[in-house]
Amino acid sequence: MRVTGGLYRGRTLQVPPRDIRPVTDRMREALFNVLAARGVVLEGTSFLDLFSGSGCMAVEAASRGAAAVDLVERDARKRPYLERNTSFVEAEVKIHVMPSERYLARVRRLQSTGWDLVFADPPYAYRHKPALLAAVAACAGVRAGALVAVHTPAGEVLAPPPRLACVDRRRYGGAALALFAVAGNAQPGDV
């Protein structure tokens, strides 16, 4: 797998074995093209990559100008791949090994400030996507005006919780990308 654009374009990333469905080159390029078409400038932004796997989305964001990237992955066996794949990234990189839902709840309690862009790529069989979206919407670490992108199977349509509005949805073969905009400020205990 290679980085598709920006400063690290062409750089090879390693994919961890076992239970991983890396985001395809086409999907990664598509997301950043959609963001560019919406006038989103990545320079200096912060990016949260939930269900990181190989970390390819966070590396793509850093390659295209994000100043800080947070990677969240529950499988500790993937941490060495995340560390290796982000070792050359000049942006601030933080790797968190825990379930995405727990991380979002923890950030809410800590009142962290945060992300301009959130990307979630849960397993296709993951049944808690509505709850995950609600947790993202309520997370104090997600800035008002942030964009949240979710990679799903093509036939799955996610209803946005309060604070999120679906602003774009695209289908790419058997996969889809839904883009939500975050409104207002999160309050502790919103979930």
Image (tube, grey):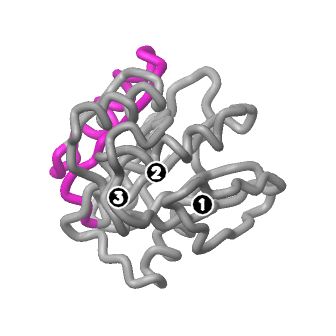
Percent coordinates x, y for residue 121 in the rendering = 57, 44
Q: Nearer the viewer, residue 116 or 69?
A: 116
Crowding at label 1, few (<14), some or many (≥20) Cα neighbours within 10 Å? some
Q: Nearer the viewer, residue 71 or 30?
A: 71
| Residue found 42% across the figure and 55% down from its top | 3
Dot 3: within a 10 Å radius of its alpha carbon, few (fewer than 14), some, or many (20 or more) residues? many
Q: Which residue is mark 3?
A: 61
Cα separation, mark 3 vs mark 1, equals 13 Å
Distance of label 2 from label 3 (alpha carbons): 21 Å
Does 183 sit above or below residue 15?
below
Instruction: Give the mark, 2 or 1, whose residue is nearer the N terminus.
Output: 1
State the residue position of label 1.
27
Residue at 58% of width from left, 74% of height from top?
167
Q: Position of residue 111 (x, y in %)?
A: 22, 40
Which of the labelled discs sits on residue 137, or is there none?
2
Residue 135 magenta = no
Foreground: disc 2 or disc 1:
2
